[in-house]
Amino acid sequence: MKIGVLALQGDVAEHIASLGDCGVSASGVRSRQEIESVDALVIPGGESTTIAKLAKAFGVFDLIKSRIASGMPTYGSCAGMILIADQILDGGVDQESFGGLGAQVRRNAFGRQVDSFETDLTFAGIGGAPFRAVFIRAPWVESVGAGVEVLASFNGHPVAIRQGHLLATSFHPELTGDNRIHRFFVDQLCKESSKAGI
Ligand code: GLN
């Protein structure tokens, strides 16, 4: 199982380290060939408009979109959540997403950079203590379609959702040293799809 972390912009190294803590050797990917060679993808936090523009400039936007649509396990954190949502609210002008995840996601929903915060969340599917979640100019999920499971919410808004092979969190688990969400992605989404032969 080869997991790539989309390395166009954002906190790539932190995701590679978190996956490494789960015993997975992940690498940064940005070329067509690199993206074609991985079995699963993590799209990091950063700036979703910039990541989308760079994906177009590198000629990999449509490739990522079609790989997600054809079942590649993908985890999007913060900007990554925005990028895998079917619909973006408060997006930049003409902002496009790779899509796949049947949800409306509101960009910068919690406010500006100064409104960034941390809180403890109950996350369905991981055992143990509540998860310390870091929100940085984070999106929230405004509404979800059929088949989307809400794994965690904050103040009535879903902030972690899953739909089959797709996982998204508004927050940044790669910044806390707690790798339970990466482990959930690897064990529940990546291993499931490799068993099913996707
Ligand atoms: N606000 C950013 C965006 O729109 C996301 C911030 C983040 O990834 N920490 O892409």
Image (spheres, rainbow, N blue to C red):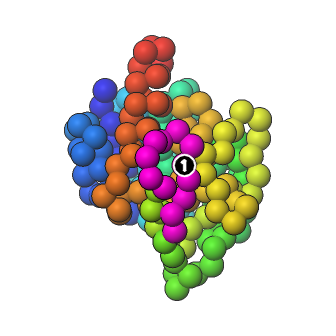
Within the magenta stretch, is there residue 51? Answer: no
The answer to whether one can see residue 97 in this image is no
Q: Which residue is mark 1?
A: 123
Answer yes or no: disc 1 within 8 Å of ligand 1: no
Q: Nearer the viewer, residue 132 or 42?
A: 132
Q: Position of residue 142 (x, y in %)?
A: 74, 58
Using residue 39 as the reference point, say whether residue 74 is left or right of it.
right
Find numbered disc 1 in the image and state the secondary structure of the residue it sits on.
loop
Q: Residue at x 71, y 33 (%)?
A: 147
Q: Residue 155 location, x and y as percent? A: 69, 66
89 relative to 166 in the view: left or right: right
In terms of depth relative to the viewer, which is nearer, 163 or 6? Answer: 163
Quadrant in the rendering for residue 194: top left
User: What type is the residue that disc 1 sits on?
Assistant: Phe
Percent x, y of residue 92:
64, 69
Q: Is residue 131 left or right of residue 148?
A: left
Taking 146 as reference, is 88 left or right? left
Name the image quarter holding the N terminus.
top left
**Badge 1 density bin: few <14, some 14–19, many ≥20, Cα 10 Å:** many
Q: Which residue appears at 52% of the width and 77% of the height?
A: 116
Query: Would you say the magenta stretch is mainly helix, strand or loop?
Result: loop
Residue 33: where, in percent of width, then height?
32, 35
Residue 124 magenta-highlighted: yes
Residue appearing at x 52%, y 85% in the figure: 114
Find the magenta span and give its range: 119-130
Q: Is 178 placed above or below 36 here? A: below
Using the image, determine if residue 82 lies above or below residue 184: below
The answer to whether residue 195 of the structure is visible from this angle is: yes
- In the displayed structure, 78 sits above or below 19; it is below
